[in-house]
Amino acid sequence: MSSGNGCKVNPCKECKRPKATPPKERRISKVEIDKLLQALYFDEDGGLTARKQTGYAFLLALETAMRQGEIWGLDWSDIDFTGRYLTLHDTKNGSSRHVPPIKQGDYIATGTSA
């Protein structure tokens, strides 16, 4: 039954949803990480370049599983150096959360090895 100028039969009735793709289980290898950092001139001197900033963001994402927007949205006030965690205010689900300590945190924050 239709009302107004609508269809009498649902044209999508016989349509089927596509099958869900399986989750990706692949992890980036140490060799791939080293190649990416080398391409970003990460270990070279010369100040903080856009490429090095990308390298820092890449390492932070690997260590914390943070999303791009969460990383670029960080401010110095979001870093608790004493408690060794980051505070994310605008996450995907809309709530704040703390990111636990990370192995390379000192290096990422200061650019120097601990």
Image (tube, rainbow, N blue to C red):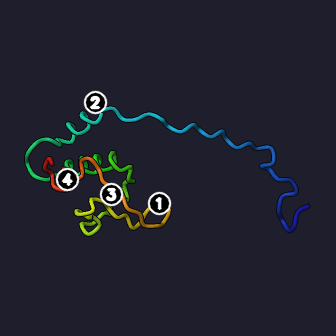
- Horizontally, residue 63 falls left or right of residue 96, namely left
Query: How far separated are the C-alphas under marks 2 and 1?
Result: 30 Å
Label 2 sits on residue: 31
Q: Please give the name of the residue rendered at 33% of the width and 45% of the height, measured from the top-left corner.
A: 62
Secondary structure state at the residue bearing disc 4:
helix
Residue 106, numbered circle = 4
Q: Quadrant of residue 28?
A: top left
Which residue is tagged 1? Answer: 92
Amino acid, disc 3 = Ile
Query: Which residue does the image show at 37% across and 64% down from the upper left?
Result: 88
Task: Tell whether label 1 touches label 4 (CB within 8 Å).
Answer: no
**Above or below: residue 92 compared with residue 17:** below
- Dot placed on the residue nearer the N-terminal end, 3 or 1: 3
Number of residues whose C-alpha sits closer than 10 Å to that of mark 2, classed few (under 14), some (14–19) or many (20 or more): few
Tell me if 67 is positioned left or right of 108 in this view: right
| Mark 4: amino acid | Asp
Q: Give the CA distance from mark 2 to mark 4.
A: 23 Å
Nearer to us of marks 4 and 1 is 4
